[in-house]
């Protein structure tokens, strides 16, 4: 592989706390030099002027959905991986809610074989410089992710799953207790979502002034916090480490903060759209804003932004959830919950949080790269001498329009459809 020199690029590495302008030399996908100015390099080196560009560690997505197998009209594994790479992600973990579900070793083996096939068929070239991200999968906690009967946990644990999750809320506390007891010695991540379906009722957005104004049934805050309090009681009693998904309320943040202060073995995440938007955006009635959990009220959004900055919430997930045009082009309350986001989460978060000074560049990269890897019990990528190149090259000033033809994803269920976005990934490396 040729040697590459990236000149005067802004290097952002949350592992070492680096945010500096430097030259970076890559040789055979290994970082071989990081200096103010690199002058000693082979004559056949490809040299790129990267002034104004950002070189960060590869992004890691904690959880998203794949259409394949079972819903290939929404998203195939190939389109999912292409979208992830186009968004700067070098690792992505998918939830087991496929058809069939990822609830037995055969499903895991099929998925890994399929990823190897796609990986071998899509080697990066100068004209297509986006390598296939590393694909991980969560193994289901319950059969067919129905929340009724636990899977053969020991058999699944012996496969290449990244951890255990259903991606749906579990309401049977006895089942949750047994799962935590059986999985305690396994030492793989366990991801749970705190949401009470009975309290949510037929709600489609967060309860509050906005839900009254827009005439849509609301979901109360306690639909999250009552379920979260019950989960925290189970976790504290049993002592099994758990990752709590999709935090969306200020009260939920307070419960997590108090639990961590007591030394509970917790990590937590929110999704990128809950940082960018709040319930007031739903005045457009765009079905792509129908999410689960729903967008929070303004005080929830501010609490989430601050909680990620302070580390109370460890990581930001994309929760990429593709649906076809026909599925989403219905009334807001009738649309399935979810939106895509792998291809524009980084630029939109950069513009909303870094450019406004709410977060530093290191804060953003920490929440999208280092911390998601740690939540998955993986070694984070770092930009250091001798390390393999797991990198994302990002142009924060590149302007482009979100249109179906400009997306790698097969689906286009996003409230940014037809709008201009500032910032785009130029290239990724994954040794």
Image (spheres, rainbow, N blue to C red):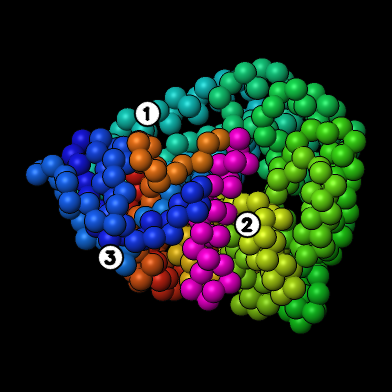
56 lies left or right of 258? left
Which label lies toward us, 1 or 2?
Answer: 2
Q: Which residue is mark 3?
A: 51
Q: Quadrant of residue 8?
A: bottom left
* Mark 1, secondary structure of its residue: helix
- In the rendering, which numbered label is found on residue 271? 2
Q: Residue at x 51, y 41 (%)?
A: 380
Q: Quadrant of residue 157?
A: top right
Residue 171 image offset from top left, x and y in percent: 85, 42
Query: In this view of the protein, which residue sits in the foreground, 84 or 55?
Result: 55
Confirm whether the magenta stretch covers residue 366: yes
* Mark 2, secondary structure of its residue: strand
Q: Residue at x 67, y 34 (%)?
A: 189
Comes first in the chain, label 1 or label 3: 3
Query: In this view of the protein, which residue sits in the foreground, 178 or 184?
Result: 184
220 lies left or right of 109? right
Confirm whether the magenta stretch covers residue 413: no
156 lies left or right of 65? right
| Magenta: main secondary structure | helix
Q: Which residue is mark 1?
A: 117
Comes first in the chain, label 2 or label 3: 3
- In the rendering, which numbered label is found on residue 179? none
135 above or below 18?
A: above
Q: Residue at x 32, y 41 (%)?
A: 31
* Screen quadrant of the C terminus: top left
19 lies left or right of 233? left
- State the extent of the magenta-drawn residues as a range: 354-377
* Mark 3, secondary structure of its residue: loop
């Amino acid at each position: 592989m040729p040697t590459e020199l990236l000149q005067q690029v802004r290097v952002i590495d949350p592992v070492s706390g680096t945010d500096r302008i430097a030259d970076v030399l890559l040789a055979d996908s290994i970082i071989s030099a990081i200096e103010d100015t690199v002058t000693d390099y082979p004559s056949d080196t490809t040299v790129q002027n990267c002034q104004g560009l950002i070189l960060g560690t590869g992004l890691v997505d904690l959880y998203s959905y794949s259409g394949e197998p079972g819903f290939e009209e929404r998203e195939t594994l190939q389109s999912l991986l292409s979208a992830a790479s186009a968004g700067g992600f070098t690792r992505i973990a998918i939830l087991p809610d496929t058809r069939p579900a990822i609830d037995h070793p055969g499903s895991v083996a099929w998925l890994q074989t399929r990823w190897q096939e796609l990986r071998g068929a899509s080697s990066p070239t100068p004209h297509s410089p986006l390598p296939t991200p590393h694909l991980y999968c969560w193994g289901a906690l319950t059969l067919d992710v129905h929340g009724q009967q636990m899977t053969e946990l020991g058999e699944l644990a012996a496969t290449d799953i990244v951890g255990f999750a259903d991606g749906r809320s579990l309401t049977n506390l006895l089942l949750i207790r047994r799962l935590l007891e059986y999985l305690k010695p396994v030492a793989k991540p366990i991801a749970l979502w705190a949401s009470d379906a009975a309290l949510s009722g037929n709600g489609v957005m967060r309860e509050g002034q906005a839900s009254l104004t827009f005439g849509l049934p609301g979901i109360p805050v306690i639909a999250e916090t009552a379920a979260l309090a019950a989960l925290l009681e189970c976790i504290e009693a049993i002592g099994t480490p758990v990752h709590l998904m999709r935090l969306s309320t200020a009260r939920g943040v307070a419960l997590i903060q108090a639990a961590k202060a007591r030394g509970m073995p917790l990590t937590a995440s929110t999704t990128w759209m809950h940082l960018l938007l709040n319930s007031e955006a739903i005045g457009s009635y765009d079905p792509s804003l129908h999410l689960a959990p729903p967008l929070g009220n303004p005080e929830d959004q501010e609490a989430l932004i601050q909680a990620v900055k302070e580390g109370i919430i460890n990581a930001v997930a994309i929760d990429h959830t593709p649906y076809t045009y026909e599925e989403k082009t219905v009334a807001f309350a009738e649309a399935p919950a979810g939106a895509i986001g792998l291809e524009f989460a980084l630029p939109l978060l950069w513009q909303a949080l870094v450019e406004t000074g709410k977060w530093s560049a290191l804060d953003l990269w920490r929440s999208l790269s280092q911390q998601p890897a740690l939540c998955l019990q993986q070694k984070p990528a770092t930009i250091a001498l001798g390390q393999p190149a797991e990198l994302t090259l990002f142009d924060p000033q590149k302007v482009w329009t979100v249109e179906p033809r400009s997306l790698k994803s097969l689906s286009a269920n996003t409230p940014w459809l037809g709008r201009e976005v500032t910032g785009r990934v130029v290239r990724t490396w994954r040794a």
